[in-house]
Image (spheres, grey):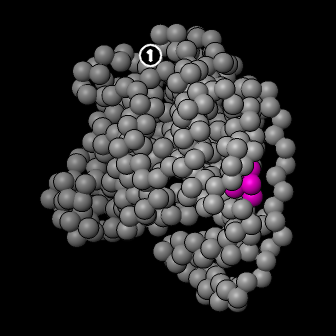
């Protein structure tokens, strides 16, 4: 792929001085290209297609939105062109950093005020030219269509949440804007945003979806007090923030990882970063069940975990983990997978039995295997139609917490569940 990318850049931009793939779960390359016989050097980013699922919108759609926003003066990276093989598009590589680790609270707030201003500017754009150019609507519908078309096994929690959304749709009250949806991704430098990043989920929707989606990423980035940010948005946009709509949009977005990666977790394709996808899903599924508990006024109880058992596989499991501890990105993926399997060897069987015990009280019988349990619970959810919401929220919380705690050793970063800012 690097040879094909180098060839495209040499033909369309200039001489490639360096080309390096980013060490991450998605194919992305950074290139430095000399133009005009070395008179100028361009720092470029080549963003490729996903390998674990095709995305709810095609990569061309992402490039289209980014190009149109740049043409209208919104701070996004300039697009240089499309590569057919491998499927990728070329854009400027923007300076700055994606977090606030070197910022004071005052500097962070200045950056966030700038970012909120960019969102307000973006939301004020006329949607008609975007729609005429092919920019799509209904992101949640696109997610569900992908999930339905690729579903490989019962997914009772996701079916429960989708059913709840159908019974309680968010009220958009006619709000209609170009949105980024997976918001809060940008580079910042000198107390201002240099560019918004990652327009993979950009489409036409309710602008409040951008204010809601940031809440999960806030647990790892830290954007400051959302009450202040929402007040800043009201000031910049001249529109009132509807808190009830925000809560609904937040809940809907918590489902995006499970909708996207259901298939990749049931049957991982080559190159898929299984543990990254699994951790994202387990963390955001817990956000989802906590959001439902808020809606229903349910106080979720702590979930007890079994004591670790020492099996005959404990020694080779520990040896495998230690052998993979240090290395490149690919080895790190295997290290996290090995720790997950080691943790399952310690408490996984007991957790699976506890899940089946919980099902007996809901189903009226105890399934014999976890596969039978998932199938029976999904069938119950689909037939229940909301009558047992309170019981099911508590049940799913226990199941999801156990699954989350199997991601790695107790107390590790993989098993740490972050708490959202209160509404």
Is residue 364 or residue 19 the one in the foreground?
Answer: 364
Main secondary-structure element of the magenta-colored stretch: helix
Residue at the image position 44 percent from the left and 16 percent from the top: 176
Residue 397 seen in this snapshot: no
Q: Residue 248: horizontal and vertical position, in percent?
A: 61, 25
* Residue 344 falls in image quadrant: bottom right
Is residue 366 or residue 180 the one in the foreground?
Answer: 366
- Please give the range of residues in magenta: 354-358
* Residue 228 falls in image quadrant: top right
Q: Is residue 408 magenta?
A: no
Name, please, the residue furthest toward the front. Answer: 365
Is residue 159 or residue 272 the one in the foreground?
Answer: 159
Residue at the image position 70 percent from the left and 88 percent from the top: 312
Which quarter shows the C terminus? Answer: top right
Residue at the image position 38 percent from the left and 64 percent from the top: 269
Q: Which residue is mark 1?
A: 176
Give the tally of numbered discs. Answer: 1
Q: Residue 100: horizontal and vertical position, in percent?
A: 67, 48
* Residue 21 falls in image quadrant: bottom left
Residue 338 seen in this snapshot: yes
Q: Residue 386: horizontal and vertical position, in percent?
A: 63, 27
Residue at the image position 28 percent from the left and 50 percent from the top: 89
């Amino acid at each position: 792929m690097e040879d094909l990318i180098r060839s495209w850049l040499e033909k369309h931009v200039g001489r490639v001085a360096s080309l390096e793939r980013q060490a991450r779960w998605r194919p992305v390359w950074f290139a430095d290209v000399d133009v005009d016989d070395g008179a100028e050097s361009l720092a470029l980013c080549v963003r490729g297609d996903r390998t674990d699922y095709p995305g709810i919108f095609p990569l061309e759609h992402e490039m289209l939105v980014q190009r149109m926003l740049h043409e209208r003066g919104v701070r996004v990276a300039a697009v240089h062109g499309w590569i057919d093989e491998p499927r990728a598009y070329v854009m400027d590589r923007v300076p700055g950093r994606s977090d606030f680790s070197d910022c004071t609270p005052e500097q962070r707030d200045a950056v966030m005020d700038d970012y909120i201003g960019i969102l307000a500017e973006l939301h004020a754009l006329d949607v008609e030219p975007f729609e005429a150019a092919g920019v799509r609507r209904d992101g949640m519908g696109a997610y569900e269509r992908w999930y339905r078309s690729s579903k490989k096994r019962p997914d009772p929690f996701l079916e429960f949440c989708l059913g709840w959304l159908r019974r309680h749709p968010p009220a958009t009250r006619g709000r209609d804007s170009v949105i980024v949806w997976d918001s809060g991704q940008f580079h910042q430098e000198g107390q201002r945003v240099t560019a918004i990043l990652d327009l993979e989920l950009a489409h036409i929707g309710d602008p409040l979806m951008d204010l809601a989606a940031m809440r999960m990423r806030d647990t790892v980035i830290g954007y400051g007090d959302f009450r202040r940010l929402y007040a800043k948005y009201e000031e910049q946009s001249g529109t009132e923030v509807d808190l009830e709509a925000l809560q609904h949009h937040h809940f809907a977005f918590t489902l995006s990882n499970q909708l996207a990666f259901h298939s990749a977790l049931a049957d991982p394709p080559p190159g898929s970063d299984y543990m990254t996808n699994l951790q994202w899903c387990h963390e955001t599924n817990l956000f989802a069940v906590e959001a439902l508990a808020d809606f229903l006024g349910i106080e979720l109880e702590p979930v007890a975990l079994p004591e670790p058992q020492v099996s005959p596989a404990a020694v080779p499991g520990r040896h495998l983990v230690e052998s993979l501890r240090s290395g490149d990105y690919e080895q790190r993926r295997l290290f996290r997978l090995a720790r997950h399997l080691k943790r399952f060897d310690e408490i996984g069987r007991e957790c699976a039995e506890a899940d089946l015990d919980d099902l007996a009280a809901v189903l009226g019988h105890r399934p014999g295997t976890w596969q039978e349990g998932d199938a029976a619970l999904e069938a119950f959810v689909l037939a229940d139609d909301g009558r047992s919401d309170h019981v099911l929220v508590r049940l799913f919380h226990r199941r999801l917490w156990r699954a989350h705690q199997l991601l790695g050793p107790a107390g590790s970063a993989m098993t740490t569940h972050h708490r959202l800012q209160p509404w």
